[in-house]
Amino acid sequence: MFFYLGKVLWRLICWLELAVLTLFLYILSFLPKAFLNAFYFSFFRIWCKFFVRALGIDLRLHQKNRIPLPKQFILVANHPSAFEDVGIPALFNVYSLAKDEVRKWWWAGRINVAAGTLFVKRESSESRHQAFDNIIAELKKGRSVVVYPEGGCKGRRVFETFRYGAFDISLQTGIPIVPVFLHYEMQEEFEWQPPYTLLDKIWHFVKLQNNRANYYVYDAIEPGNFTSKEQYMEYVHSLYLGWQARYLD
């Protein structure tokens, strides 16, 4: 009984801490962008870690890479859930590419904008091209970015193909790709598919019976080993199918 009450109290404290930090970042987001650039992204990553803790997710990074990660990279990952929107920045120093709808997510939208999150309207060819250019601009600043090549939440299994964007950018810039395979042990509860809303998924996360989220990071893949974006994409996609067979099938 006391153990259960202690867990409930701890969870309430975590949500209170998250609420205070959220309010702080929301107020800061109204300051000039030039002023925020110096520190806001670091605070955003702390906010993501607080969010993970408040949700009660046991987020674990498995370092399958045999050599150290490069200083700058394009991170790619499968995208079965909404959780990786905070899970990936909590673990990796990367700027995210998110769907344009994230801008409208109450307080979280404004915080993401202030943190430098990039946005794309997936159904718009013009927006996709602009996002392509924006990612290259971020990379030229020396930053790392995360792209979900499935093109959105496609379900608990790796989608039948990847989009070419991240691989084309890697070839053009010479910046390697770091693949991260995401494995949620309670796949059905983590998976984000209609008709569930974001609030529905947050409630699902809070009441999980198995809260383990495993993020497997592998060695960086050098673009110089490929002659086309198609070859590059197909190779990386085949790796994900292999990891899926290992961890999910």
Image (tube, rainbow, N blue to C red):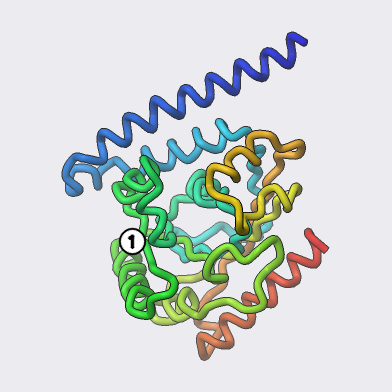
Q: Position of residue 224 (x, y in %)?
A: 50, 82
Question: Residue 98 is drawn in which quadrant?
Answer: bottom left
Identify which residue, 228 or 67, lies in the foreground.
228
Considering only vertical position in the picture, is 161 above or below 189? below
Image location of residue 108, percent across then percent down? 39, 43
Residue at image coords 34%, 73%: 127
Above-or-below relation of 24 to 103: above
Given residues 196 and 147, the one toward you in this image is 196
Please provide percent x and percent y for residue 61.
Answer: 64, 47
Q: Quadrant of residue 40?
A: top left
Which quarter of the image is occupied by the N terminus?
top right
Mark 1, residue position: 142
Q: Is residue 145 above or below residue 108?
A: below
**What crowding class fits label 1: few (fewer than 14 Cα within 10 Å), some (14-19), or many (20 or more)?**
few
Q: Is residue 230 left or right of residue 246?
A: left
Is the C terminus in the top left, top right, bottom left or bottom right quadrant? bottom right
Residue situated furthest front in the rendering? 195
Q: Is residue 23 above or below residue 126?
A: above
Give the quarter of the image for residue 53.
top right
Residue occupying the point 55% across, 47% down: 87
Q: What is the three-letter code of the residue carrying label 1? A: Gly
Q: Position of residue 49 (x, y in %)?
A: 50, 37
What secondary structure is found at the residue carrying circle 1? Answer: loop
Which residue is pictured at 46% across the width and 77% down the height?
Answer: 165
Residue sitting at x 51%, y 63%: 75
